Amino acid sequence: MGLKRPDDAGVYKITDDIAIIQTVDFFTPVVDDPFTFGQIAAANALSDVYAMGGVPKTAMNIVCFPSKKMDLSILRSIIEGGLDKIKEAGVVLVGGHSVEDKEIKYGLSVTGFIHPARILTKKNIKAGDNLVLTKPLGSGIVNTAVKGGRASPESIKKVIKIMVALNKNAADTMTRFNVHACTDITGFGLVGHMSEMVSDSELGFEIFANSVPVIQDALYYAQMGLLPGGAHENMKFYKNLVKIMPEVDPIVCDTFFDPQTSGGLLIAVDQKETDALLTDLEKNGVESAAVIGNVIKSTGLKIIINK
Ligand code: CO
Ligand code: CO
Ligand code: CO
């Protein structure tokens, strides 16, 4: 799988039983605490392997750091935070590279394994599939409130817990079911990543707005107008694909465009298996997983947002 049909990660077949998954992700700090930033950046980078249905095996650090201006203990904490998540994932850190830069950036390049017949791309959804989302939305909005000094300590704690959580248990669980497609929710928001799943197809999505898991405080901050710039960009970019029914709360809708950091998996599962998948997700500690919509036949508007 290459660049013609971009997916969450690149996949290269080695034998009839093994393909490797390769991905890289790094970014500037999203939180003040360096250890927590390392955890979030690593969880986010590992996520693309999980979104392919794979098992991450090795990782390499990617570091940009202003070592002449900033104390090296900060860098050490970032890397320790990353290592904490790498270990939790059962992954081996095999190296890395660092460069001098004006701004801190950190992330990983990750290699994983998958059986070539079990690759979960963004495509291959079927009419009638249920859509399951495994983490609540709203991290971009809460992070914007944090930057504006408006976020409560409780909502900061909540959003960090969501961002540092690996998608490992969700991926381990979903691969035991008849899942047709999967991706993870990151910068393009729920609607943006959904649009990648339905492009060039005769299919679309119906979202049940009130069933989508959302960080409650994010709704409060969204009401105050604390939307990240990326959410406005996503709205502009994807609005032609979306029909929002009049009875839907517009504030809830804002979260569907909110760019996520280390967001959850979006899973299209055969509807006969949905209940069992949800039960197992909860059993495996994926607390907020919920059915948020269905795959429908649609040639025109791709995403219908109902109440
Ligand atoms: Co992805
Ligand atoms: Co990525
Ligand atoms: Co995928």
Image: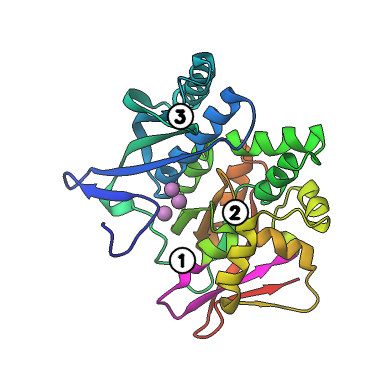
Quarter assignment of residue 246? bottom right
Tell me the number on the disc at residue 259.
2
Seen in the picture, residue 93 relative to 243 is either above or below; the reply is above
Q: Are marks 2 and 1 in contact (CB under 8 Å)?
A: no
Q: Residue furthest front?
A: 68
Seen in the picture, residue 177 relative to 55 is either above or below; the reply is below
Question: Quadrant holding ligand 3?
Answer: bottom left
Seen in the picture, residue 54 relative to 246 is either above or below; the reply is above
- Point out the stretch of residues depicted in magenta: 195-209
Q: CA distance from mark 3 to mark 2?
A: 24 Å
Say which label, 2 or 1, has the lower sequence index: 1
- In x, y percent, where is residue 140? 65, 49
| Circle 2 crowding by C-alpha within 10 Å: few under 14, some 14–19, many from 20 | many
Q: Label 3 belongs to which residue?
A: 89
Q: Label 1 belongs to which residue?
A: 196
At 57% from the left edge and 30% from the top edge, which residue is drawn? 37
Magenta-span inclusion, residue 210: no
- In x, y percent, where is residue 71? 53, 16
SS class of the residue under badge 1? helix
Q: The residue under label 1 is which amino acid type? A: Glu
Q: CA distance from mark 1 to mark 3?
A: 27 Å
Q: CA distance from mark 2 to mark 1?
A: 15 Å
Q: Nearer the viewer, residue 132 or 95?
A: 95
Q: Decide if residue 299 is on the left or right side of residue 23.
A: right
Can residue 284 be spotted in the picture? no
Q: Nearer the viewer, mark 2 or mark 1?
A: 2
Q: The residue under label 2 is which amino acid type? A: Pro
Tell me the number on the disc at residue 179.
none
At 50% from the left edge and 31% from the top edge, which residue is drawn? 104
